[in-house]
Image (tube, rainbow, N blue to C red):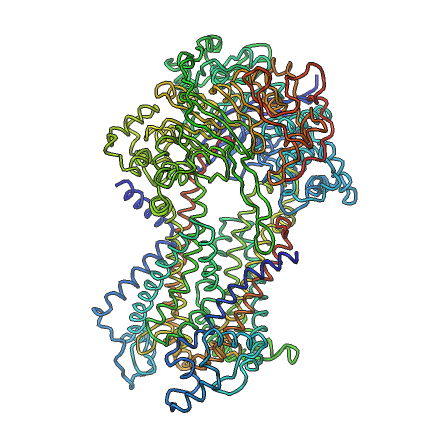
Amino acid sequence: MIGYVLRRITQLLPVLLIASLGIWAMIYAVPGGPIGVIVGENATQEQIDAATRQFGLDRPVLVQYGAWLKNALVGDLGVSIHSREPVLDLIAQRLPATIQLAIASTLVALLLGIPIAITSALFPDSWLDRALSGWSALALGVPTFWLGILLILLFAVELRWLPSASGYVPFWESPIQMMRNIALPALTLGVYVSGILARFLRASLVGELQADYVRTARSKGLRERDIIGRHVLRNALLPFVTIVGLMMANFIGGTVVTEAVFTYPGLGRLLITAISTRDYPLIQGCILVILVIYVAINMTVDVLYAYIDPRIEYA
Amino acid sequence: MIGPVLSVRGLEVAFGSQDRRVPVVRGVDFDVYPNEVLCIVGESGSGKSVTALAVSGLLPATAKVEGSILLGGTEVIGADAESLRNMRGQEVGFIFQDPTTTLNPVLPVGRQVTEGQVAHGRLSKADAPARAVELLREVDIADPLGRAGQYPHQFSGGMRQRAVIAMAMAGRPKLILADEPTTALDVTVQAQVLSVLARRQAETGAAVILITHDLGVVAEIAHRVAVMYGGRIVETGPVGEIFKRPRHPYTAALLQSIPRIDTGNRRLDPIPGQPPNPSALPSGCAFHPRCVIGRDRTRCRTEDPMLHRVGETQFSACHFSEQTNAIGIAAQPRCESSRSEIAKEPLLIIDQLKVHFPVKAGLLRRTVGSVRAVDGVSLTVNAGETVSLVGESGCGKTTTGRAVMGLIKATGGNILFNGQSIRDLGRAGLRKARRQMQYIFQDPYSSLNPVLTVADIVAEPLRIHGIYDEMGGASRIAELFDMVGLSRTMLGRYPREFSGGQKQRIGIARALALQPRLLILDEPVAALDVSIQAQIINLLQDLQRELGLSYLFIAHNLSVVRHISDRVAVMYLGRIVEESTRDSLYEAATHPYTQSLLSAAPVPDPAIQRKRRRIVLQGEIPNPASPPSGCYFHPRCFRASARCATEMPPFEQYLRSPTRSACHHAGPLAEGGDIPTIGGSSGYRPMEAAS
Amino acid sequence: MNRMMRASAMTRRLLTRKGALFSLIFLAAITGAAAFADLLSLDPLSQDLVNALEKPSAAHWFGTDELGRDIMARAVYGARTSLLTAAGAVGIAAMVGIPIGLVAGFFGGWRDAVLMRAVDVLLALPGILFAMAMIAVLGRSQTAALIAVGVTGIPSFARVTRAQVLALRKRDFVTAVEAFGGTSTYNMFRTILPNAWSPILVQVVVLASVAILLEAALAFLGVGIPPPTPSWGEMLRTGKSFLYEAPYYAVLPGLVLTLTILSFDSLGRSLTWLLEDRHELVELNVERAKP
């Protein structure tokens, strides 16, 4: 087991390393290069020279990368050009909001997606199946930012039940306020992801239902609900775990658009602000943190999958 | 007299929509009595599997079922889900074809074995694990206690199928339905599974319906036989009568067309044409277009014959069943004239060929060992000769063929073609050498490029070598079509429009396009229907005679090999264990593995079958990544001594015979019982490691 | 000839599905409008501040925006932006992704490892973030949006192609070509690729919908194609500020965007169904004895 985890980590290391190299190199690809980013476009030659020395930009490129990586590993992601605050602090302020939204959205997605998929798979090609599959297609196809706008129009503008802009309220401070604030963004994201989950789970359930072992189970005289519950679901849920994990990983950075719709103060908004103010250390920091979380969740899912599937042996 | 366990009357099953209904079973009647094995034989599309599924009520909802199926006094057709459920597992148990997929991969085997009984409330949850162990022990699974908690992927194929037998028997049902239960298994494993099935059947007194296409299996296990063709039973009767005096032309022709392990010189009498497609059945008797008797008779063309009594217990559905005896007398001896002219000049010499695949493991994927797929194989094929390489799955026979062809890189040894080493050849040289030898694949369904017309497929080798026009272009392609017996009108069609046998002919035409001297034939008939195999075998023999070809014939089917070969080499775990001329190998094998293989292969003749002594080998083929010490065969061998476990036997000539054998104790089978025969196969050794 | 007949038979079969039929009609209408927008006497840029934020009317079917521009005209020209970006992006993704998948799948070994790790790097971030990061570097422009969306699509082509090649690589007809002395290049381009088209085609359609969505999302976030070029995402972004005064401003262009995405998605599913169905028809006739 530990060997398997180690092997996965060694496989991911090159990916992380190359990606971090890309993130670091970003700043060199920007017009004006790193110095321009630090001192601004209208700097004097002295300012440039001073900055070059101060930030060690006269050292060989690989040494610079090494220094950057070393700092990043101990949590020093530099200082925001705009607010002059440490990048890590800025990110740490926003991360809880994003995580809270990710969890709420996942719950919505699972609560909608799993029942839809099971109902669909039990009556394949019936009108019910077609209706639910249509719903999944709709949930998948409607852009989240349009759905968000429609939800705001309905619940905030027309009915005035919920705020049109959602703030971050930690769950333990006021669960009710938290619910009011997170309801619309979580619904928006959750509906979208429920479409993916339902489509995937339905396909894998229908596939499993045609497997030979289902016929074997029927031939033993098992009840249909036991066949689904004990045999089919167990097989279909294995790959489903991976999909759910991928979704959660996607929520860490992929909620950018939803956060923008509801002006929700998460990591995504921070990144957009950073990009529009050309705050490169902050951009790099955000992307690096998202990357690490994303890759870590993916790996956890892999390992979890290997753990619950008896066929995979981690030799 | 005891009444039947199962009584089927007027069974009809059709698939498809209201407007395009395809009849798959068209009026089938039969009974099965307690303590009886009924075999239903037929080719693809005959409706045999659908009949079995109908009996169990397991057909998909799209199937339209009519008639009557009385199982233990209960009508199955139209029964509600609950009574069907109660019937399954209690009245009837099932064994399916593919043991790799019939068990749920994520549940422990033991639980799956007893699950049905628990569901029926006939076994308490607390008692289930102990009962599972007991059931697994009854089907000869070693260490049943440990095995019960394992998952299917930790079982070998034969063990899985035995576990499925245990599962089917768990409720002591009155009827067992087995659908091709050994088709996916190797011949020595098939022998184990059949013997377990037969023993458990005798112990429980259950009735068994066994569906198969293999007449050898029928002869081995059946009491009574029903032959199906085109959705109907065309003949039924006691096994002895059916084989001795078939009263339907299809049964008779089928028996004539199959190669037999006990004779090799007869030229096969193939049944012309293809088994009918259920969606386009011939009028009248479905067999008439392929029938010697009925081909030209109006009555056969217009009137579908009913099953009628032709003997005390034998029934046939033929208008002219009394004329069936005439079939088979015409069998000609195999044309031997060319055989004597074989020049003893070697065309292909395989010398100490080794193909090892690295096994990687650990953090850095380092090579920690190797799978010795082929481990020092030496073999010579002379010009105009057929040499066969036989063995069970995983023995390395296909890898050897592919290495000779240069499709897999050899890791040691040498391959000489026409005196020149192929291993030293560069890319261009190899390309040129490949014009001299060609490969024919097992699976005609996957060996033809689906996006090309068959004319383009046959022309492709010529185009690749840039000699299409030089060789005569389109007229050469048409000529090749004539040679393999295909109509020129088919040239513009796509592979999917052809049947399996026709596709194999296209594959042969393509291989002949470059005018090779050697053909490597990798199981060329294994994927074909029984009645089609003979057509292809005859075609291959004719082509060899006309074109002076040499064949390296790779196969697992010993009967086919006996039929086509001049010399035979038997492989086990990457090595040749015995090699000889055909007749001395089949008549006087010296290696215990060859002897077991020969004895495990069923003969389609119940009279002979009963007289034969069967060696049932213990265990299954070990993992080639970690072969046993000494002689690779010793853990399964009935003759093994202490020496065999430590010392690898040399491959050397046996006395003054034409045979070379790799055994410390080579020699003919002893008269008398030093070997485990079919009745005495009790307890498998724990050697049978999961692969 | 035969191949043409087959293609037309497939198309007829595709059109028997209502979803596919409606999708094709809608996409044809949108594409037609975008292509011939200049002939429709619609002006997306002329401002009319007096008539700003007008409700939909006979003169302005979709109403006017905060500068008095005709929203429908902007939506039609937005379709042009959107479809062109999608076409370009899918083109980039296919041109880079298909060869990567082909080489990685066919040769395996170190080539496979290197190429697929490189593709993994592209997948190490959610697509939208990756595109945003690229735009942060390249600056905000039409080309940047095109490249960003295109690069994000490379992994799907690479993976689909590789999976196809791996499956086909083991098929005997590919080995057969090797056996008569066909070269690797011949095998890759003449044998494997012609057999791998169907899932790649499905991928083109699926990716078109993803590209349109991504382009709109970037514009919605204010990092896509810069104004005044009309773009659906940009319209939604501005329209969102006027939800109370002019709800139709965000809703109607969003509807057009949504219908376009749904059409591509539905077409993709119909294609998958069609290709799988054909596959099944072949398989059904193949009930054969295994050795």
- B139 or A153, which is in the foreground? B139
Instruction: State the image coordinates of residue A179 (x, y, percent, origin top left).
Output: 60, 75
Residue B31 visible to an observer of this rendering: no
Against B52, is C126 above or below?
below
Q: Is residue A277 above or below residue C36?
A: below
Quarter holding residue B152: top right
Pick the residue in front: B486 or A210. B486
The answer to which of B195 and B280 lies nearer the viewer is: B195
- Where the N terminus of chain B falls, by quadrant? top right
Q: Where is residue C23 drawn, in percent x and y?
A: 36, 57
Which residue does the image show at 57% across and 74% down from the upper left?
A73
Residue depicted at 61% across the width and 28% down the height: B190
Number of numbered discs: 0
Q: Position of residue A130 (x, y in %)?
A: 47, 53
Report the quarter where the C terminus of chain B lies: top right
Does B255 sit left or right of C225 as displayed? right
Tell whether B498 sits left or right of B72: left
Asked if residue B479 shows in the view, the reply is yes
Spot occupied by residue C121 in the image (x, y as percentages of width and height): 47, 64
Quarter-of-image position of residue B618: top right
Residue occupying the point 68% across, 42% down: B109
Q: Quadrant of residue B281?
A: top left
